[in-house]
Amino acid sequence: MKRQRLTILGATGSIGASTLDVVARHPERYEVFALTGHSRVDALADQCIRHRPRYAVVPAADEAQKLQSRLRAADLPTEVLAGEAALEQVAAAAETDAVMAAIVGAAGLRPTLAAVRAGKRVLLANKEALVMAGAVFMAEVRKSGAVVLPIDSEHNAVFQSLPADFGGDLDGRGVRRLLLTASGGPFRAVPIERLAGVTPAQACAHPNWSMGRKISVDSATMMNKGLEVIEAHWLFGAAPDRIDVVIHPQSVIHSLVEYVDGSVLAQLGNPDMRTPIAHALAYPERIEAGVAPLDLFQVAQLTFERPDLDRFPCLKLAHRALAAGNNAPAVLNAANEVAVAAFLDGRLPFLRIAEVIGAALDAVPVAPVSDLPAVLAADSAGRGAALAALR
Ligand code: NAD
Ligand code: MG
């Protein structure tokens, strides 16, 4: 069997590391073509030494020099590249078969789109890219024939619960609703009056999942679920009123699909991202992921709650942006990135995150987005409006 060659964008992050963990279990199936990292050059060097990629990508010349000398000392053939264009280059390279898109935030859009345009098999973790560019992104997918496989656990669960040859036609396949589960994050049961004083460390202490800091805060505000509703809309062609959010604190059911005959299909498992990663890497085959088998006796109980929109106003804001369409999801995403960064920096109280995003949505007029420059303009308008609201 020919080995699949992989580019991992955002290799040094939580998803990147989990991807390399799965890949290392199957050296006969996968070969690492390129790894990219942003701030943790030493971690990237260790990954290169272990996985021997053809290319490694860092943000700028300084880091490149540092990394290249470490790799030379280890006698590695890896070539170090720097800058955003290099991210696009390794995502679209003819020698790579599949691209794990695991950069966090809007920074992942261009390289992810480059992989899509090159018709790669794209393992999509970087939900922000799809949220901000929805229509443009999906048009490029159709044009190039790229295969997009969802890594987000909910979307991967929906994908697994849809018919194998699902072509985007929910009605034709008898699907009534998609149900996205949400853990509710670390503040699901904290008294609302205590939310004003929560710290970044508390927000990042997720009860079930271990993740990067930005998505951890998104889970605490439930903006993560809002972004995921928008993501599901684009991935599965589902109208907003056919996507429901169900709070399920155990994070065992990763999402469900309801059919017109009353059947509800779901995917279950331990909360470990190596499951969706292994699924997407091997699809349509199945491979060992290193994940412990689900012990239902240990889980004992699965419970469900309706989301409380007063507690989680970010969920409401995401629905508002999806309903407005056009540039609104890009503005929402950009404002959220600005607000979350300010919160993580100790410059913005937790409850002000939603206010800043709401103010940005109020400030930027809804306008159509028909190409990448328009998406990037909406992103910068959202950032500008959020920064103004921070002051
Ligand atoms: P992380 O913060 O752990 O890692 C982010 C990666 O992106 C790192 O490799 C970092 O070096 C790189 N990066 C950051 N800024 C960059 C920039 N400006 N340019 C280039 N590279 C940059 O994040 P994560 O938790 O691994 O999440 C990655 C993506 O996957 C996010 O979009 C997140 O929403 C999504 N996701 C994560 C999980 C999870 O369990 N961690 C689950 C579902 C979806
Ligand atoms: Mg998710």
Image: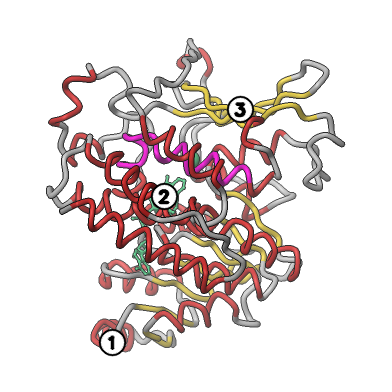
User: Which residue matches tag 2?
Assistant: 332
**Secondary structure of the residue carrying numbered label 1:** helix
Crowdedness of circle 3 by 10 Å Cα count: few (<14), some, many (20+)? many
Crowdedness of circle 1 by 10 Å Cα count: few (<14), some, many (20+)? few
Q: Magenta span has 223?
A: yes
Q: Magenta segment, principal secondary structure?
A: helix
User: Which residue matches tag 1?
Assistant: 73
The kind of residue on which mark 2 rests is: Leu
In the image, what residue occupies the spot 77% across and 30% down?
Answer: 175
The kind of residue on which mark 1 rests is: Ala
User: Which residue matches tag 3?
Assistant: 179
Q: Is residue 215 visible?
A: yes
First to last magenta residue range: 217-233
In the drawing, what numbered circle is on residue 154?
none
Q: CA distance from mark 1 to mark 3?
A: 51 Å
In the image, what residue occupies the spot 36% across and 70% down?
Answer: 37
State which tag comes first along the sequence, 1 or 2. 1
The kind of residue on which mark 3 rests is: Leu
* Rendering coords of residue 178 (x, y %): 65, 30
Q: Quadrant of the C terminus?
A: bottom left
Given this view, does label 2 or label 3 mark the residue nearer the observer?
2
Query: Quick one: 272 or 193, which is closer to the camera?
Result: 193
